[in-house]
Each structure stands twice: as structure tokens, then as C-alpha cells.
Image (cartoon, grey):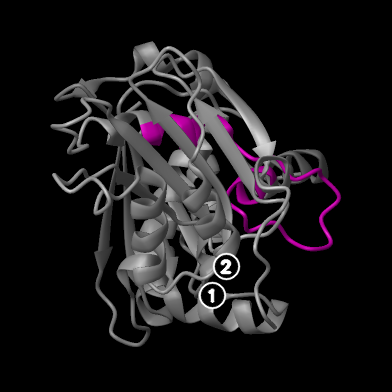
């Protein structure tokens, strides 16, 4: 599945980093995967301030007040109907245009402080809220509101942004990480072994970082895909890893080497998920403790 997320920031009150953009992009993709939408899709996200979203709200809905998020689907659907009507939606350049989401960063920042969670978590929540509206879900009554909220929280749980008091079991979406590892594998530099490996790391903030093995003629200077992905995450300011998926050209499921397991532990814990897969996308999930029972411990 190809997902294109077009993000435009037209406000200057809240700074937007690449990390925040990645979280919103991941939120869109996780929603579409959760709803089993496989066609190439495009979602536009406009980031504004309170005054601009009040203006849009008044123009489009006749409500003269600011809000946190607005959604404008390309095709109006009833709850969930879009899932069975994708083939009827016009395709432009083979991409299904789902619609536009408008988010007030001012309100998102205020709400994050009010609810006691991170700004990133609030933006992911508002993005998922907007996407599910584009997919035809609504919250006009208590039952539909509960259904939509459940879907949002499941997706946020998959991203590692689960609300602490939420009752649903946290679900790790292994398939997304495996798919990204397989896609990334093609970029590997492996002229000596011919053995390409890709990895995808999911961090506590909900971001996904990918990496490949990079070989060197001296062999000892070679870097494994797992460490490439982890180091990319750490270089972007991440410090905690929830899960990592590994894939190779082999039909056999591939496992991280000992050094990579120790590196993963440095930024994870004994329960960090290691998703080992093959070139067909088959995978098995292990806790890090299962693969590294006698690890070197960090000094507190």
C-alpha cells in the first residue's frame, strides 16, 4: 500500500519539526492499514492557528468558533461504507484522494497540556480522528462515538501512544513494521555477501525509522541493518525503542546478531518486541529477553 500525506503548515505560533510530521504521516498509514485499505491513497493535512480554523469552520460549517480538527472527505460516506466502496471512487493518477484534514496547532498544544500527555500524542490523536472522519466514521451518538474512539485508541496503541487509562489491550502492528523492513531491504549495500537485510524500528513516540546493512571490505566495519535503524532513531533524538522488525532475502526467518541485540537493549528493555521475518513476510515475534537472556546490564 502506498500512502501519500501532504502536510502544509501555514501558521507560525507553534514550531513543527520533521519528527512531528513523521508522527502524523505514520498515524494516517496506521489508520488505513487498520481499516484494510490497500489502494494507493492521498491525504492532505493543513496546520493552522485558532483564528484560521475558526474562519474555515465558519465558512464551511456556519460555526463561528475555533476547534481542534476538521475533516473534509472527497466522498461522503456513511459509517464504514467507504471500505466497501473503494472501487467506486474516482482515481486520479492511480491515487485515491481521501480528502483534507485541518488541525489547529494552538488548540492541540493547549489540549496536550490539559490532558497531561505529549504534544506528539495529541497530534497523533487528532490526525487519527480526522482520518476516520474521511473514512466515513462519525460520532453523532454515543454508540458511534464509542466505536470511533475505540478505533483511534487501537491505532494509537499500535503506534506506542496508548492512553494509560485506556482499557483496550495494546496491539503491536507487526505487519506494518515487517512491510517497511522488506521495502527498505532493497537499499542495502551488500556487495561482498550478497545478503540484503532491512530493519524498521518503532520508537516510544510512534515514529518508525528504517535501516539496511552496509558492508565494508574490512568486514569488521560492516554495520547491520538493525543498528543502522537504531542509530538513525537515536540521531533524531529518540531514546526508547518499542519494537524492531528484521527481514532479509532468505526464505528462512532472520534473527539479529548478538551485538545488535545488545544495542537494542540499550534503548529498549527485556520486553521490547523483536519481529523476525523472511522475504515472504512471514514472521515470528519474540521478547528481547528470549533472544538475549544473559545481557550486559546498564549501570544506573
Q: Taking 276 as reference, is 42 left or right?
A: left
- The residues tagged by marks 1 and 2 sit, at their Cα atoms, a distance apart of 5 Å
> Residue 279 — which label?
none
Frontmost residue, 151 versus 148: 151
Residue at the spot 72% in from the left edge and 54% down from the top edge:
270
Q: Is residue 166 magenta?
A: yes
Q: Taking 187 as reference, is 136 left or right?
A: right
- Quadrant containing the N terminus is top left
Residue 227's x, y, as percent?
39, 53
Residue 111's x, y, as percent?
62, 77
Q: Taking 97 as reference, is 150 left or right?
A: right
> Residue 119 — which label?
1
Residue 107's x, y, as percent?
52, 78
Residue at the spot 49% in from the left edge and 39% down from the top edge:
256
* Residue 111, visible in the rendered structure: yes
Q: Is residue 24 magenta?
A: no
- Quadrant containing the C terminus is bottom right
> Residue 122 — which label?
2
Tag count:
2
Name above or below for residue 194 compared with residue 232. above
Residue at the spot 46% in from the left edge and 31% down from the top edge:
178
Provide the secondary structure element on which disc 1 rests. helix
Which corner quadrant of the image does residue 290 belong to? top right
The residue furthest bottom is 13
Which corner quadrant of the image does residue 266 belong to? bottom right
How crowded pointer 2 is (Cα within 10 Å; few <14, some 14-19, many 20+) is rated as many
Frontmost residue, 38 versus 143: 38
Magenta residues (range): 154-181
Contact? badges 1 and 2 (CB < 8 Å):
yes
Amino acid at each position: 500500500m502506498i500512502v501519500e500525506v501532504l502536510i502544509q503548515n501555514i501558521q507560525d505560533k507553534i514550531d513543527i519539526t520533521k519528527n512531528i510530521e513523521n508522527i502524523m504521516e505514520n498515524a494516517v498509514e496506521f489508520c488505513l492499514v487498520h481499516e484494510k485499505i490497500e489502494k494507493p491513497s492521498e491525504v492532505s493535512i493543513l496546520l493552522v492557528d485558532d483564528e484560521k480554523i475558526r474562519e474555515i469552520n465558519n465558512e464551511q460549517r456556519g460555526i463561528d468558533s475555533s476547534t481542534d480538527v476538521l475533516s473534509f472527505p472527497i466522498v461522503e460516506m456513511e459509517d464504514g461504507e467507504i471500505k466497501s466502496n473503494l472501487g467506486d471512487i474516482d482515481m486520479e493518477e492511480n491515487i485515491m484522494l481521501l480528502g483534507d484534514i485541518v488541525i489547529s496547532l494552538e488548540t492541540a498544544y493547549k489540549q496536550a497540556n490539559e490532558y497531561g500527555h505529549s504534544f506528539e500524542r495529541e497530534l497523533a490523536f487528532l490526525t487519527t480522528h480526522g482520518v476516520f472522519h474521511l473514512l466515513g466514521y462519525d460520532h453523532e451518538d454515543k454508540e458511534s462515538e464509542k466505536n470511533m474512539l475505540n478505533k483511534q485508541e487501537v491505532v494509537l496503541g499500535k503506534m506506542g501512544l496508548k492512553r494509560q487509562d485506556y482499557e483496550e489491550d495494546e496491539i503491536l502492528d507487526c505487519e506494518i513494521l515487517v512491510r517497511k523492513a522488506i521495502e527498505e531491504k532493497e537499499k542495502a549495500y551488500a556487495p561482498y555477501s550478497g545478503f540484503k537485510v532491512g530493519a524498521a524500528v518503532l520508537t516510544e513516540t510512534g515514529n518508525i525509522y528504517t535501516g539496511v546493512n552496509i558492508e565494508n571490505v574490512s568486514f569488521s566495519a560492516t554495520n547491520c541493518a538493525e543498528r543502522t535503524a537504531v542509530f538513525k532513531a537515536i540521531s533524531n533524538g529518540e531514546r526508547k525503542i518499542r519494537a524492531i522488525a528484521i527481514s532479509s532475502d532468505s526464505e528462512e526467518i532472520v534473527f539479529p546478531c548478538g551485538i545488535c541485540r545488545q544495542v537494542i537493549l540499550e534503548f529498549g528493555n527485556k520486553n521490547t518486541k523483536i519481529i523476525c521475518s523472511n522475504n515472504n513476510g512471514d514472521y515470528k515475534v519474540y521478547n528481547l529477553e528470549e533472544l538475549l537472556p544473559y545481557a550486559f546490564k546498564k549501570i544506573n
